[in-house]
């Protein structure tokens, strides 16, 4: 177009861009952090500060009573243990089963594109469509309100994620590695176990973390498939509804407790985040 | 193709196999199928079988208040379609999910552009921007309630200071504020989703392209409209699709923030089906409704996903 003018943006304009740019980032950070700050502060506020006007931005005498109450009076500890068991078991099961399938899809093209897309379509299946029949079936087979029941359904709902993450990962590994191992006399299983799995370790870790975070944060199944025994951390929040106000300290304390592990784990695999979120459709 | 050649290539060696070799050659031959079996069986048992079972439930009378499972044909479906609450829930779902996806795109795209080029502190800001993705939506709803709800939350106080006179908005019960609150919580949590995907897309666009454009005197606005957006379009579509298909399931935030109320005014499709099935125990009506919902979602998936996710031929 205006090839002859060749106007370089002036220094003032450049400064203007920088102000807008960092202003926007700063504003967004404030929007993200303020609710978190308020929650953390609420969890260490003495109950008397809750209703103060103007609001207490930081308590003069921070307290841990809400944490003890949340863990021991509101069965938070039990929920924490349940969540750990269920999320860990889901991770292991989903990663093992998903890795095997991902490998098969990538190396042998098993079932062609149809099988891969069939698994993928599970990712978009609304939980509400299966939770009612699962509820009825679980009651019949004694899986209602058990750890095993939640682990099984979480595994199925994380499979699209683990299968497609590993599918994408194995597709990147050169096929020649397998062929070389086969020529050296390895069985197919040995080729998978000794050659491909060690190379795919980073992908396996990422898939595992995603499965863990899913099981750790899932609410809908936990709400409907557990009651007095296998309840998880997110599902414990149902018992705080209806007692508005009085329990804000306890619920905030539980929120803090449940946020720490999943955020810590999630940030570990930040590099793989985009691939995980888009099921391998996009590289991060 | 390439796989088939590989399999054929090892066939001659199998001819000299011993008995032990016979077993391992059997596992070798069906190795691919064996590996997918556990996953396929799990999905069949806990997803496909329940879906088929629910189809049966939706055509009979499965109601904890009425004994027996008499076949009733399309009655359950008719009841859902005729229910004004069901229609209102579906409308809420459509409006809320459209609103959050548009807002998250509108906020996430500029954020991705602002974060694209390296600057000091970028490495510290990234984790903060990604944090919400690892949180339970229930918890997000929980602390937004904490922030908004009168008289405990500081929102009304802060707004009052800002505009100079007392503000008394009941954020979780008044129209339209209850919808604003729900949207706020969702946008807070999922704008980072749009951001991180769009950032990956922007990173993939070649630097040389911008340098060439800069040399040719193209203004930043021109390069945005004529280069960035067209090149980013497939990624935007991908992000919007993934986000939309999750947004239509909106439940957790509703459950904690408004409980569907006041009355049934903030019911979404998922919340309506949950109420019908698990609170009123009209199981047949709820399964019929979830099949209708599933059919509607499938239409959206057919239109969007299959076109998007065709992986490159390996």
Image (cartoon, coloured by chain):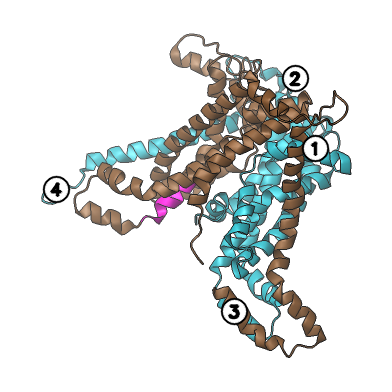
Q: Are marks 3 and 1 on the same chain?
A: no
Q: Nearer the viewer, mark 3 or mark 2?
A: 3
Residue placed under numbered mark 4 in the picture: A2
Camera sees residue A250:
no
Mark found first going from the N terminus, 1 or 2: 1
Chain identifier of the residue bearing label 1 in the image: A
B163 horizontally vs A144: left or right: left
Chain identifier of the residue bearing label 3 in the image: B
Residue placed under numbered mark 2 in the picture: A243
Mark found first going from the N terminus, 2 or 4: 4
The residue under the point 45% across, 16% down is: B162
Circle 2 packing at 10 Å, graded few (<14), some (14-19), many (20+), is few
Give x and y (percent) for residue B249: 61, 35
Q: Are marks 2 and 4 in contact (CB under 8 Å)?
A: no
Residue B138 magenta-highlighted: no
Circle 1 packing at 10 Å, graded few (<14), some (14-19), many (20+), is many
Circle 1 SS class: helix
The residue under the point 62% across, 70% down is: A108
Q: Nearer the viewer, mark 1 or mark 2?
A: 1
A125 horizontally vs B195: left or right: right
Q: Are marks 3 and 2 on the same chain?
A: no
Q: Which region is colored magenta? A: B196-205
Give x and y (percent) for residue A174: 54, 73
Circle 3 packing at 10 Å, graded few (<14), some (14-19), many (20+), is few
Looking at the image, residue A73 lies above or below residue A243: below
Q: CA distance from mark 3 to mark 1?
A: 46 Å
Mark found first going from the N terminus, 1 or 4: 4
Q: Main secondary structure of the magenta part?
A: helix
Q: CA distance from mark 1 to mark 4?
A: 67 Å
Q: Are marks 2 and 4 on the same chain?
A: yes
- Quarter of the image holding residue B82? top right
For the residue pair B122 and A135, the one nearer the viewer reads as: A135
């Amino acid at each position: 177009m205006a090839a002859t003018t060749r106007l370089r943006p002036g220094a003032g304009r450049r400064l203007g861009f920088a102000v807008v740019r960092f202003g926007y980032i700063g504003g967004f950070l404030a929007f993200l952090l303020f609710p978190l700050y308020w929650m953390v502060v609420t969890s260490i506020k003495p109950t008397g500060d809750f209703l103060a006007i103007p609001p207490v931005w930081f308590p003069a005498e921070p307290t841990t009573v809400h944490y003890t109450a949340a863990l021991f009076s509101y069965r938070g500890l039990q929920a924490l243990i349940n969540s750990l068991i269920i999320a860990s078991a889901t991770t292991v099961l989903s990663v093992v089963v998903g890795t095997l399938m991902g490998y098969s899809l990538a190396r042998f093209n098993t079932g062609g594109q149809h099988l891969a897309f069939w698994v993928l379509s599970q990712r978009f299946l609304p939980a509400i469509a299966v939770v009612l029949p699962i509820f009825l079936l679980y009651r019949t087979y004694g899986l209602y309100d058990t750890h095993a029941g939640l682990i099984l359904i979480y595994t199925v709902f994380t499979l699209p994620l683990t299968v497609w993450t590993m599918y994408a990962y194995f597709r990147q590994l050169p096929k020649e590695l397998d062929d070389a191992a086969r020529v050296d006399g390895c069985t197919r299983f040995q080729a998978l176990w000794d050659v491909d799995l060690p190379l795919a370790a980073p992908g396996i870790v990422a898939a595992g973390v995603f499965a863990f975070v899913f099981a750790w944060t899932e609410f809908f199944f936990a709400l409907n498939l557990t009651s007095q025994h296998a309840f998880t951390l997110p599902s414990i929040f149902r018992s705080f509804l209806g007692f508005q106000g009085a329990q804000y300290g306890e619920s905030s304390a539980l929120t803090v407790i449940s946020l720490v592990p999943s955020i810590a784990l999630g940030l570990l695999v930040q590099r793989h985040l985009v691939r995980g979120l888009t099921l391998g459709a996009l590289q991060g | 193709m390439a796989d088939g050649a590989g399999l054929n290539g090892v066939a001659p060696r199998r001819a000299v196999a011993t008995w032990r070799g016979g077993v391992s050659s059997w596992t070798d031959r069906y190795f691919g199928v064996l590996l997918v079996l556990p996953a396929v069986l799990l999905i069949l048992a806990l997803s496909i079988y329940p879906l088929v079972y629910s189809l049966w439930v939706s055509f009979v009378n499965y109601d904890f208040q009425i004994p027996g499972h008499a076949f009733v044909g399309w009655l359950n479906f008719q009841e859902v379609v005729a229910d004004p609450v069901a229609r209102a829930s579906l409308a809420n779902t459509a409006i809320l999910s459209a609103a959050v996806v548009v807002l998250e795109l509108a906020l996430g795209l500029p954020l991705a552009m602002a974060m694209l080029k390296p600057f000091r502190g970028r490495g510290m800001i990234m984790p903060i921007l990604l944090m919400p993705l690892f949180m339970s939506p229930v918890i997000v709803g929980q602390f937004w309630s904490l922030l908004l709800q009168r008289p405990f939350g500081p929102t009304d106080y802060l707004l009052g200071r800002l505009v100079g006179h007392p503000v008394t908005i009941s954020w979780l019960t008044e129209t339209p504020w209850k919808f604003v609150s729900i949207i706020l919580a969702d946008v807070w949590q999922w704008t980072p989703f749009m951001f991180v995907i769009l950032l990956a897309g922007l990173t993939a666009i070649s630097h040389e392209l911008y340098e060439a454009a800069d040399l040719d005197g193209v203004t930043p606005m021109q390069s945005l409209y004529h280069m960035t957006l067209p090149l980013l379009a497939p990624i935007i579509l991908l992000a919007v699709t993934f986000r939309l298909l999750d947004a239509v399931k909106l439940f957790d935030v509703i459950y904690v923030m408004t409980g569907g109320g006041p009355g049934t005014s903030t019911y979404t499709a998922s919340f309506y089906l949950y109420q019908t099935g698990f609170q009123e125990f009209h199981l047949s009506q709820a399964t019929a409704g979830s099949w209708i919902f599933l059919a509607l979602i499938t239409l959206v998936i057919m239109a969007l996903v299959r076109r998007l996710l065709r992986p490159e031929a390996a």
